[in-house]
Amino acid sequence: MARIYEYQGKEVLQKEGIPIPKGSCIANPDEAIKVAQEIGKPVAIKSQVWSTGRFKAGGIKFADTPEEAEKVTRELIGSRIKGLTVEKVLVEEKLDIEREFYVGVIVSDSVKVKGPVLIFSSEGGVDVEEVAARNPERVAKLTVNWLQGVGLAEAEQLLSKVSFNGTLSSELSSELSKVICSLYKVFKEYDARAVEINPLVLTKDKHIYAADCRFTIDDSSTFRHPEFGIIVPRDMTREPTELEKIAWAIEEGDYRGTGYFAQMVSKIEGKGWIGMHGVGGGGAMVAASALITRGFKIANYADTSGDPTASKVYRVMKCILSQPIDGYVLMGSCLANQEQWHHAHAIVKILREEAKERPGFPVIILLAGNKEREAHEIIREGLKDVPLRWELYGRDYIYATDFIADRLKELMET
Amino acid sequence: MAENKIEFETRTTKITIDYSHCEAAEKNSPNPSCGFACVKACRLYGRNILKIDGNKPVLAVTDPAEIKRLDNECLGCEYDCWSRGSGCISIEIPLAGIEDYREKLKGGK
């Protein structure tokens, strides 16, 4: 599911009346002093990356003065937290925390539910699953009647199932109930798949704040929310690469089959990288396993299943072959019911073009299923005089991904 | 020159048939050696966008919006013209930004 950053999620929460710490998101360390001065108290500087455990990984730091805030911001921006490059930080007031809670709305795929579930925990700031396993009495869930929605009655019902340390004052209960109702409203209006506040903080001066926010949006709904600037609406832990942004145009608005492309790394360096192309996710996973165990470095994952047009297959392959790779494999390790002659036409067109740029380039094609015989005839004829080192396999090899991987290894090492 | 080729756009491609290199069109032959491979390919792999008229392949669907709606971008006409005919059909499949990206990569190597 498409993600938005913590600062974006907090802006949404604030709009819906859930208090957030005062602060601003910046990409330039020079701005940190001004922001910290405006806040006028110690600040937290939080790396805006799509990862949990930022604090332990050194992605969240504190500063007592504006000058310190600038220094810390300079250290964080450009650094890597859990493999992700920090491009922005959120500089916000440091909260004087008395208690921490967790509140979230997720979509449960359980066959008994298949809908939104409200979750509240009286122990926040830690993984809610960990709390549920250790102290289940502190965590409560409520399946939402999505026709009815969530009002104060549902919120109070949820809180009544939670064990708090001591009693829950009526004022605090009222505040928490309002947050729960607002959070559900956010979940619904922004087409979220999950929206979580962890921790939801009660400060020593008895104010409630959403100290963190994790927000994922249904991929198919991102067109309704241009304000988030989501370029490639997919579940990614990093910003899309330039090539992924280019490849997204293959899929955007075109539902004629799948033309999926995603890079495994944001930069390909050195030798031994291969372009991987699957037909069907399950077969592709088996294929990837065979490739990785032989020491291949997979530059990308691509999939052309669901009966895509030949033009889509061509463009996906063009993206794969636009990487500095040392070999290409089409691991169609399944008996596909789509007419494979469309793949064949695309394969011939792109490889005939590509051969001019990369004579001798190793190519392994495993293509099986409907119209397989005709597809293979097209490929054999189309590539017969092309200066590539290529091999073609069919249905007898759909379970032989190890063999296919070995063939690619041999071609690449020769 | 304008009559010597046809160009039409599908949803994501541009197809050009250059009659100056098309044997059927050049010879005005009802039985070219290619056997009107492009039209047959469109019937087998595609959506009958092409037909034979005046001894040459022409559009059977002329409304540009209908071509975009109907054509399944099979690439069959280009391939079959190349393998059985004179290779007078070319299909461009643009992908915005990809050529600049490839050039940049070459420059960086």
Image: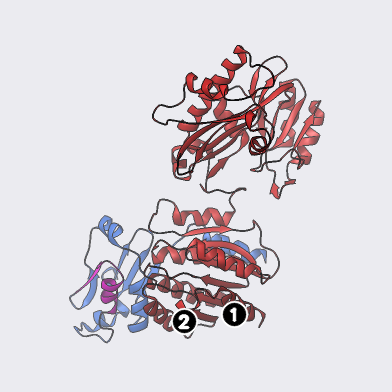
Instruction: Estimate how packed mark 1 is, as few (under 14), some (14 to 19) or many (20 or more) residues with alpha carbons within 10 Å.
Output: some
Task: Read off the chain for label 1.
Answer: A
Which residue is labeled 1 in the image? A407
Image quarter of residue A76: top right
What element does badge 1 sit on? helix
> Which shade of the palette goes to chain A?
red
Q: Quadrant of residue A197?
A: top right
Quadrant location, the C terminus of chain A: bottom right
Q: Position of residue A171 (x, y in %)?
A: 61, 12
User: What's the residue type where badge 2 is placed?
Assistant: Leu
Q: Earlier in the sequence, mark 1 or mark 2?
A: 2
The stretch of residues the image draws in magenta is B34-52
* Disc 2 secondary structure class: helix
Height in image: A192 above or below A294? above
Q: Viewed as shown, does residue A384 lie left or right of A285?
A: left
Chain identity of mark 2 = A
Q: Name the residue beneath numbered marker 2.
A: A383
Q: Which amino acid lies under the numbered mark 1 shown in the image of this protein?
A: Arg
Q: Is residue A299 visible?
A: yes
Nearer to the camera, A326 or A202: A202
Chain B as rendered: colour:
blue
x 48%, y 85%: residue: A385
Position of B88 with respect to B40 (left or right) is right
Q: Nearer the viewer, residue A115 or A72?
A: A115
